[in-house]
Each structure stands twice: as structure tokens, then as C-alpha cells.
Image (cartoon, coloured by chain):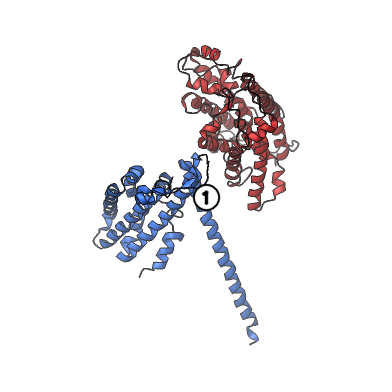
Chain colours: A blue, B red
Amino acid sequence: MANYSEITLNGLWKNNPALVQLLGLCPLLGVTNSVVNSIGLGLATIFVLVASNTCVSLIKTVTPDAIRLPTFVMIIAAAVTCTELLMQAYTYELYEILGIFLPLITTNCVILGRADGFACKNSVAASAYDGLMMGLGFAVVLYLLGGARELIGTGSLFANMDLLFGSVAADWEMTVFNNYPQFLLAILPPGAFILTGLIIAAKNYIDGGIKRAQAAKLEQQEKVSKRVRVTGTIS
Amino acid sequence: MALMRITSPHAHNKQSTSDVMRLVLLATLPGVLALTLAFGWGTIINILLASLFGLGLEALALAARKRPIAFYLNDYSVLVTAVLLAIALPPYSPWWILLTGMFFSIIVAKQLYGGLGYNPFNPAMVGYVVLLISFPMQMTTWVAPIELLPASVSIPSLWDSLLIALGLLQLPAVDGFTMATPLDLVRQNNALMIDDLQQQYTQFGRWGGTGWEWASIAFLIGGLFLMYRKIFTWHAPISMLIALAFLSAVFYDGGSSASIGTPAFQLLTGAAIFGAFFIVTDPVSSAVSNKGRIIYGAGIGILIFTIRKWGNYPDSVAFAVLLMNFAAPLIDHYTQPATYGHSKKSK
């Protein structure tokens, strides 16, 4: 039986596709120069991951092992095409901006990795949930990067959100710093590399803190048990 | 810590890092003086602010890394980085440019990689390149040399220069206070013969750019002084200058409009001499063996000329240095000297 809390933890933190597996770096670095781009790509990736994981899991018993990878890629490509057509229909400007990175979701290693590593061995529900969690883990990093790069690069946040959410969002743009000289490095690809590195470093730092806390706790427990053994003769 | 020794045992008198760094600082003095005479107080203010920011950032990083702060601040390496970056930046740069540059020099290029001696890239050049690609407008606006300023323009005093850098005072918004640099002119020129171009624009001096040529000669004096004091060997800087001079001689093209100037012009304008003696010679990020340094220096010279002639940027010392920093480990791998007593072939 699949352990749902572990799937959640894996996707969002312990085995985060962007920060730990370092998969799908191409879109991660390529399109995250604004919040709206990263939300668009994040949603598309989540959708594709859930759809492909579900389909792969559905046909896992009838897929011959020898041709499983081409089969998975076909399924993923179909899901990506659906996403592309949907975005073309409903968010055309964003579709134009994301450009080549939408069809490239097909080659995002996270998706094939989850299909081959998880969905073809687990139940449909667990696979769909895993797709959702992995996609969320990936998307959260996309949003973080997109937000940081837009803020550092242009000094404002949530520009052009109407591309995704319609005219309601036209005035969502926040100018955080006035008279901000554009810091182009953050918007250019090197900024994405540097910021991704810093986010990974931050995650490792937090992990290190957690580990130390656990070790300290364990040590304390051991001390207690030792003491019990040593003084066990008293009682 | 003896930085420049490549093989042991040599019973030289020991040179500590701070001794070396102090000498380098001393050697930049003639160049800084020449730049100040040529372009005004802006360079001095750059150095002042960059040093302050550098020391502050280094202290912060050392505190965060739980290292002894006073010990590392006393090795003067931060000041050398600050001075080199400040010289490379346009005079009267605003404070936030200096702060951003020093942040990337000290925090990103140096401390994140482990501090002095562990940085694969020259910190000052990392800071410079980050600024150059991030703020193209501010980074390519050079003030005109003082001798070319119209008589009506008054040169900002030292105090006014500080206020300008802090953003409390505007640069004189007079026509002719900033000018295209000579390297800009030759790069954009595609109609005039070099001789005609040099007569048409006052930015060209006797050999190089007005103001630039004397600064370059002053940096040459400082560099030769360091070489005489054996702070670095001749290999990297001289091979860089020879490569640059050779290529500019080959592509001088009889002074046609496609040419970017004589070898003397290429050497004495922009950052070529300054880079050769103060950046290329960085012991940490360059190749280690003498043969390796010749290749390393020549590579930088070739890249400088390539980018100046065919690239998008008028000057290119920083890009060339960073690209060859990437290559330094590879050069070291292939130029490992044979151990004493072994023939070259034996493994």
C-alpha cells in the first residue's frame, strides 16, 4: 500500500525534483524570469505529470518491459500536446512567451523519471498523487525563482499577470522599489544559475539543522537509557 | 603563506600574504595618480567606497563563516580586490554600483568558494563582469579626460565627487562631460581610415587614448616594480601583451577603416597594461607552472583582441581573464613540469 504522507514529503522536500534530483533544469533556468512565466510553466508541468503518471499506471500491466520507455514518451508527448492546445486556446499570450519551453516539457526528465520510477510500479491513485506532489515540488521552486528573479531584476512583482488570469489581474503588479535600476543579471540565465545554487544551499542548510537537532535528540535519549541501565540495580 | 613559490625548497626570505598585497597596493599608486590627473577625483572616491564596502562585506562573511575576522582583514587582500575593481569602474560610479560589484567580488566570487586562495575566478573581474552585463548604461558612460573638457565645465571637487557617488549631487549635465572612449570609437568606426579618425576626435592622444596612455604607462611602471620585486614572474603578463600586440599588428590592415588601431594604441588604451600586470598575475586563479603561465597569458591576449575586434564590447580584459580562469586547471594538467631528476617522458 502506498504511503501518501511519504509521497508528499518526497515530492515537496526530501526528493524535490528541482533541488535534490536536479532534473528539468532547462525550463527551471530558462523561463523563470518572471512570476507569470513560472506559474504558467509550473501549472503545465503539474498537469502533464499527473496525466502521464495516471495513464502510465493504468496500462502498467499490459506494457511490455522492452518497449516501456517509448510507450511512456508517447503518453507524455500526448499529454504535453493537450496542454499546449489548451494554453493556445485560453492563454494565448503566455503560450507565445513560453514558446519552445512548452513542447520541451516532453523532455523534462522529471516526468519520464516518475513514469518509469514510480507510476509503472504503483496503483493509479498513488501514481496520480505522486505526479501532483512532484509537480508541486517542481512548481514551488519555479515560483520561488521566478519571484526572486523578477524582484531582483526589475524591482517589481506580478507584472503581466493578466496573461494568465485575465483582465482581473491587470493591475496586480506591485512596484516594490521605486526608481530601481534594472539588475539585468538576475533576469539573464546566469542569475538563474546563481539563485538556484543559493536555494539549494539554503535547503541543505535547513536539512543540516534538522539533522543536527535529531542527532542531539537521539544523544539525549541514549544518555537517558544508559543512565537507566547503569542505575538499574537501584530499583 | 607564500603565494608565489611554485617549487620547494627555496630558502628565500619569507613573504607573507599581507607583504605581497601591500606591495601590490603600492604599485597601483602611480596608475591611480595618473587616472586621477586625467579623469578627476572619481577614481579616488571609487577606491574609497569600494574599500569600505569590501571590508564590511568581508567582515560579515567571515563572521557568518565563524572565521577570525581581524586575521583575515589584515592580509590586505580585500583592499587589493577593492582597488582593482574601483580602478576598472568608470569614475563617479554611484555607490550602489560599487556595493553590488563588491558583493559579487567578495561574497560570491571569493567567500562562497572558501575565501582567499580558493577562488577559481579573479574576484575583482567577477564583480566587474556582473556590473557590466547588469548595468550596461552606467558602466559604459565614461567621463571625458579633463584636458578635453570645455572650459565652461568645472571639474567636481573631491567633496563634490563624494556627493555625486552617494547620489546627493548630479554629474554636471553638460555636453562633453562624458565622451565615447577611444576603444568605442575605433569599434564603431567603419568609414574612416584610422589616421583620419585620430585627427577627427580629440579622444586620441599621442599613441593611445588621451589620458589613457599616461595611465597605462603609469601602471606599466607599477607592474615592472612588482616584477622587479619578484611578486610575479614575467611569463603571464609579457606573453599576454605580446599576443595582443602581435594580433593587432597582423590585423592593423594598413590603418583601414576595418582596423581597430596600431599595436601601440591597443596596448596603451583601455585596460590592457593594467590587466596584464595586476589582473593576469593573480596567483590564485591563473595557471601555476611557468610554461602554463605563458599559455594562460597568451590566451588572454588573444581573447582580448578577438572580443575587441569582433565582439560586442569595446574592452574585454575582464571577459578574457574569466574565460582563461576556466581554462587554468586544464592548462595546469597539460603543463605539469617534470620532477627534478626525471626525464620529461618517464611517467
Name the image quarter holding the N terminus of chain A.
bottom left
Residue at disc 1, secondary structure: helix
Residue B254, above or below B289: above
Which residue is found at the position 36% from the left and 51% from the top? A168
Percent coordinates x, y for residue B300 in the rendering: 54, 29
User: In which image quadrant can residue B87 be found?
Assistant: top right
Nearer-the-camera pick, A156 or A64: A156
- What amino acid is labelled 1 in the image? Leu
Which residue is found at the position 63% from the left and 20% from the top? B152
Percent coordinates x, y for residue A25 in the rendering: 42, 48
Which residue in the structure is indicated by mark 1? A198
Percent coordinates x, y for residue B301 in the rendering: 55, 26
- Left/right of residue A43 with respect to residue B284 in the rendered view: left
Name the image quarter holding the C terminus of chain A.
bottom right
Which residue is found at the position 52% from the left and 21% from the top? B185
- Looking at this view, name the residue that lies furthest to the right: B13
Residue B308, above or below B6: above
Q: Is residue B312 visible?
A: yes
Labels in figure, total: 1
Nearer-the-camera pick, B191 or B16: B191
Residue B277, above or below A196: above
User: In which image quadrant can residue B44 be found?
Assistant: top right
Nearer-the-camera pick, B201 or B101: B201
Nearer-the-camera pick, A103 or B336: A103
- Looking at this view, name the residue that lies furthest to the bottom: A235
The chain ID associated with circle 1 is A
Residue B259, above or below A23: above
Percent coordinates x, y for residue B180 in the rendering: 54, 23
